[in-house]
Amino acid sequence: MDRSHINFVNSYYGNQRTCFFFPHGGCKAKNVIDGRSVQQDGIRGIDILFGGSYQDPDSIRNIWVNLNTTIAKLLDEIVDYILGKDYINLAIAAENVDKYVRTYRRRQCLQVLSDSSLEVHVYGANWENARINAKNNILIHQPVGFLEMLGFIEQAKMVLNIDPNFADGGHERVFSAMINGAATLSNTNSFYSGEFTDGEDIILYSWSKLHELPTKIYGLLENPDKMEALRLAGKRKAEERHTWVVRAKIILDVIETYKSLKNLRVS
């Protein structure tokens, strides 16, 4: 799902495997939710939607804090280095450090939105332990299945994406949000900035400038015409370039290329 993964596989598993870039695709929700069609009345009652569970990043860090001083210090330095970047290839990072960065950024992002008095509906496990809801504007719901989540996306004006440390790849949350007609907010990386245009078909935010995200969101909420143009532009682009049908064609092309190369004979 990330172009940098290709280099990792080729480096550590050799060239005997066929490896290619294959990002997620978006999924369309069913038209009927709770007996009524969202498509018919066009009502979207959720301002901002985020799907993803919470895990306390400090509990993950405790895994290495109690190790010997040298290793703990090294891992903390890796965490500081990664958190100082908008995106970075994490193949060289330990798995627990990767998890720490992901969970830390999830909590940090929602804390910033909470402090800005923005109302966010969150679907996922353990968020009651995050201690970020001082203003009671982060509305916590229990986890739901994938198809049900697509239905909620249909009801959302905006969908927030927080990637799992992709440096050059995409997540289905972005494409599904667009395909189902929501304005999409996502952390930036090389892939998203190359595929989309910030402010035209997506809103990209930077980890080093996370404090700017609430201003971008308020800019859309206060300008419905701009939000409408952005969500429609994102929907068109995702339907054209980021569906599972498009991804399936990539698989077929790779298979045909592989078969052609396999049939070559050196004389």
Image: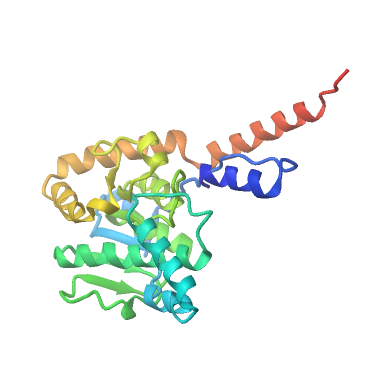
**Residue in the picture at 16% in, 67% down:** 115
Q: Is residue 18 above or below residue 128?
A: above
**Residue in the picture at 17% in, 55% down:** 214
Q: Is residue 211 above or below residue 189?
A: below
**Residue sticking out furthest to the left:** 222
**Percent of width and height locating residue 199:** 23, 39
**Residue in the picture at 37% in, 76% down:** 58
In the picture, residue 100 is in which quadrant?
bottom left
In the picture, residue 136 is in which quadrant?
bottom left
Instruction: Work out whether residue 52 can be spotted.
Output: no
**Residue in the picture at 49% in, 79% down:** 67
**Percent of width and height locating residue 231:** 28, 42
In front here: 114 or 19?
19
In front here: 240 or 42?
240
Q: Is residue 14 left or right of residue 155?
A: right
**Percent of width and height locating residue 126:** 38, 77
Instruction: Work out whether residue 213 can be spotted.
Output: yes
Q: Is residue 21 left or right of residue 200?
A: right
